[in-house]
Image (cartoon, helix red, strand yellow):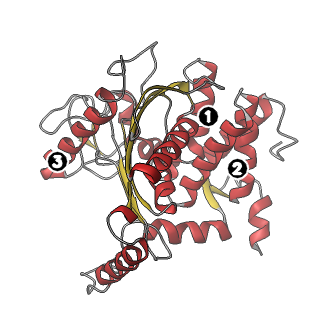
């Protein structure tokens, strides 16, 4: 391997665990596979861009490893390509949106755009979404608001029960992420993006694909015992709430997200409908300029971030990073050098390409 360009073209080496693929090539592959499965151009690009952007930021659990699952969901009728979203209730500052089981990436992007437009007029706005599919990396939506000079907040329920409430051994909660983005003069975004469980469920699937163990504290097996084998997740294992011995904090946050995203979102949205897992969202936008001059605020956010970073590093630490900084620098590096993709995922994409007659067109023969 002599150059970055070589990384873009090379096929997987079966003697290694990973292949390295450039982002633009991965987007082209994913768009083609999703369109072959029935997605429109706009839908396919929303999903492909969302997944690859997650890979670039280092959130590989929400990256292209999920594309085969989305395609399976289309075939099973759980995702409806071309579904029209509907505003079922609206005010000048709010909207309740029925996604009609469309692509979560596509539906939630439109919902956040609506919230931003409302906030431009009313300064504060919120939207809820129900009956849609998985929304991918949640950070994508608050970042839209931050780019518009606003503070964006998003929370989402993650479909079915995956996480035990604190003190329990049976799943009653989703991984239920929360993300907040704040406009600033920083190069990297000031961005919180976190699951309320010890880890996102996709990281277990990623560990399975990579043949890796997981840290103790992420998962209990079907018998309620702590385990480091991610395969136990597929055999009745249950994720743990964020916080370890202080897991009541993650469990409490997850419960609030359930109320905002499962019960507040719309009629009948509190249960599984038509055997689909529901991915509800709560989105809120705050126009900074309604509170104080935007330029002053952005500068002071940057000053605050630098004050955080000025703290002396603790033992065995590489120093302080403000929220969102590590993901940004990882993205810069992966744009140049490519995305490490486990061969199991790469092989699955190749198989999908062969099955729909696109292997030669996508150089995946």
Would residue 269 be seen by someone viewing this image from the given angle?
Answer: yes
- Quarter of the image containing the N terminus? bottom right
Q: Tags 2 and 3 in contact by the CB under 8 Å rule?
A: no
Q: Nearer the viewer, residue 222 or 192?
A: 192
Q: Under tag 1, what secondary structure?
A: helix
The residue pinned by badge 1 equals: 68
Cα distance in 3D space between marks 1 and 3: 33 Å
- The residue furthest top is 274
Specify the quadrant that holds the C terminus: top right
- Mark 1 vs 3: CB contact within 8 A: no
Residue at 38% from the left image edge and 18% from the top image edge: 272
Instruction: Classify 10 Å Cα crowding around label 3: few (below 14), some (14-19), many (20 and above).
Output: some
- Residue placed at 52% from the left, 72% from the top? 329
Q: Position of residue 85 (x, y in %)?
A: 55, 27
Determine which residue is flagged by label 3: 247
Crowd class of label 2 (few under 14; some 14 to 19; many from 20; radius 10 Å): many
């Amino acid at each position: 391997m002599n150059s970055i360009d070589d990384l873009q073209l090379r096929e997987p080496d079966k003697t290694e665990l990973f292949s390295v693929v450039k982002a633009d090539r991965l987007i082209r592959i994913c768009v083609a596979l999703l369109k072959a499965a029935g997605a429109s151009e706009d839908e396919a690009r929303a999903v492909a861009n969302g997944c690859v952007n997650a890979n670039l930021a280092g959130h590989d659990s929400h990256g292209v490893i999920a594309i085969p699952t989305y395609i399976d969901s289309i075939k099973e009728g759980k995702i409806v390509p071309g579904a029209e979203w509907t505003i079922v209730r609206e005010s000048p500052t709010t909207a309740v949106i029925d996604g009609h089981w469309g692509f979560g990436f596509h539906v939630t992007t439109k919902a956040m755009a609506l919230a931003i437009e409302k906030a431009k007029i009313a300064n504060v706005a919120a939207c809820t979404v129900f009956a849609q599919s998985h929304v991918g990396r949640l950070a994508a939506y608050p970042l839209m608001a931050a780019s518009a000079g606003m503070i964006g907040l998003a929370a989402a329920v993650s479909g079915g029960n995956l996480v035990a409430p604190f003190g329990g051994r049976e799943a009653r909660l989703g991984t239920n992420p929360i993300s907040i983005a704040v406009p600033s003069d920083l190069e990297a975004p000031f961005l919180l993006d976190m699951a309320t469980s010890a880890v996102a469920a996709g990281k277990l699937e990623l560990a399975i694909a990579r043949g890796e163990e997981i840290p103790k504290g992420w998962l209990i097996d079907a018998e309620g015992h702590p385990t480091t084998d991610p395969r136990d997740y597929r055999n009745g294992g249950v994720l743990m709430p964020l916080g370890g011995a202080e897991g009541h904090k993650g469990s409490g946050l997850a419960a609030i997200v359930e109320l905002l995203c499962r019960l507040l979102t719309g009629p009948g949205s509190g249960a599984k409908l038509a055997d689909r897992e529901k991915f509800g969202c709560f989105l809120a936008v705050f126009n900074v300029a309604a509170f104080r001059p935007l330029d002053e605020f952005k500068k002071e956010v940057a000053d605050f971030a630098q004050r955080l970073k000025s703290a002396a590093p603790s033992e065995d630490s590489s120093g302080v990073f403000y929220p969102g900084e590590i993901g940004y620098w990882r993205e810069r590096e992966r744009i140049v050098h490519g995305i490490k993709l486990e061969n199991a995922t790469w092989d699955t994409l190749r198989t999908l390409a062969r099955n729909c007659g696109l292997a030669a067109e996508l150089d995946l023969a």
